[in-house]
Amino acid sequence: MRLAATIVFLGAAAHLAGCAPDVCEGEPAAMELRVRTTDTRVQSLVVTLGYGGARYQRAFDVADALDDGVAALAVDLSGTPDGAFDLEVEVTGHTGSMGGGSAIVRGADTFAASPDACNIFDLALADGEDRDGGPPVDSGVDAGVRDGGDDDRDAGPARDGGPRDAGPVRDGGPRDGGPDSGVERDGGFDRDGGVDRDGGVERDGGVERDGGVERDGGVERDGGVIQPICPMTADADTVALYTFNGNADDVTGNHDGTEVSTNYDNGAVGCGQALSFGSSSSVGGYVVIPDDNAFDLDDGAIEALVRVDSVTSNRPRFVFSRSSFGNDAGEIRIGIACDGTVIVERETGFSTVRACSANPIAANQFVVIGVNFGTGGLDLYVDGDGSTQGGLVGYRGTNCNDNVVCGGVTNGGMAGNNDPLVIGATSEDSAPGMTNNLDWPLRGGRVDSLRISSARRSF
């Protein structure tokens, strides 16, 4: 499951114009979602998408963008099915920043989408009862489940049960593939140049597209990555899964961790709690998972849903370690350098191969760090981005003054390693099989979930 669906926030006045069908059909999957609400209390939106068996979520501050009651979101969709698919969309409006406060309005629908850039949808938000810390009540807005009857909504025009008129005409007929989107397009959306509004007054205020979703250079962008909703589940390839909802138990029931002075805080939106680490440079809380032969994997994957309070730091921060001092086989460590570069190391004896992310992670945002190891090589992904860098990166030591070399090839895994697994620090200076000398804690960070698999994963 690829978790790199990117979502870019556009200012309310910058709506995208439609593109010619013969052009946008050849572009990568994307959509424009126009969120409408008249509630002036809304300060942020939480957008949830579901498609291809996966769900994603992200919060956006939109107070300054809703002056005209519309916020336009341009969304690049990765990992979509090859053909037409159902795209589930839910949006909640909140009184606080970044999904905080009360959820006061909500809208949800399931749209018939296509794996190109021709998807343009509208979603109106309806009033809901104020509720702190959770989604609003369903105040009559359909959640995307169709019962086969007419669906008259308080927040938008009634559905007519007829064919959807939301996209370009193809093959001489109306677009086929799903239920009516709930927005009547005839007379409202002019695909020849702009948005036809106010009784036929055509505006050229849209952003011209040559095909796909082209963003105007002056439009405000968020530029972040839409967040996965608890993306890790236990399947046939799962060796161990930790969701850290107040404990370090393994979801599979086979490899429970031991908590040492651990703390918990809010996890990713909708994912419960996360293992939380303080700001001290000394190792405080951490989790130890006892060594087991099940972890001696020739091929496999490690992934973690991680957040740091600050990109920069005066010390490296470690997420995961199965390592010790000496000539051990199959050691793997995952850490974050002082500049936010994510680094995975595989060490055998005194030979170390590293994969280093090409870009630093963002602060105050949960990201999925994914690592594949074994016969296919050592690969690193950050929110689905597999681009890496070579050369020197400052990593260990105060202010990361000690450079390490990024790059190299290794085709081994964790087989032959008898060290315990540590979450929240590195055990590389501990005696073999021990955790007596931990260092470089994940200060100011959180780990929401961590999964170890016996097969390589698609990140």
Image (spheres, rainbow, N blue to C red):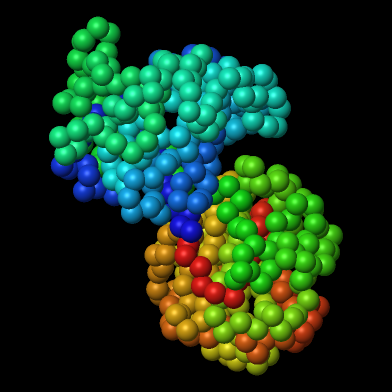
Using the image, determine if residue 154 lies above or below residue 302: above
Residue 251, how many percent across, how many down?
73, 62
Q: Residue at x 54, y 26 (%)?
A: 142
Residue 207, picture quadrant? top left
Using the image, determine if residue 280 lies above or below residue 186: below
Q: Which residue extends farthest top?
A: 199
Residue toward you, 409 or 131: 131
Q: Which residue extends farthest front?
A: 148
How many circles with numbers are drawn on the protein?
Answer: 0
Q: Residue at x 47, y 65 (%)?
A: 458
Residue 453: in sight, yes or no?
yes
Residue toward you, 406 or 243: 243
Residue toward you, 216 or 411: 411
Residue 27, how many percent across, how many down?
24, 47
Residue 257, how many percent across, how many down?
79, 67
Using the image, determine if residue 145 lies above or below residue 396: above
Side of 357 relative to 333 (left or right): left
Q: Residue at x 41, y 15 (%)?
A: 157
Residue 398: in sight, yes or no?
no
Side of 293 relative to 194 (left or right): right
Q: Residue at x 70, y 32 (%)?
A: 133
Side of 128 relative to 430 (left or right): left
Residue 130, how many percent across, how many down?
68, 20
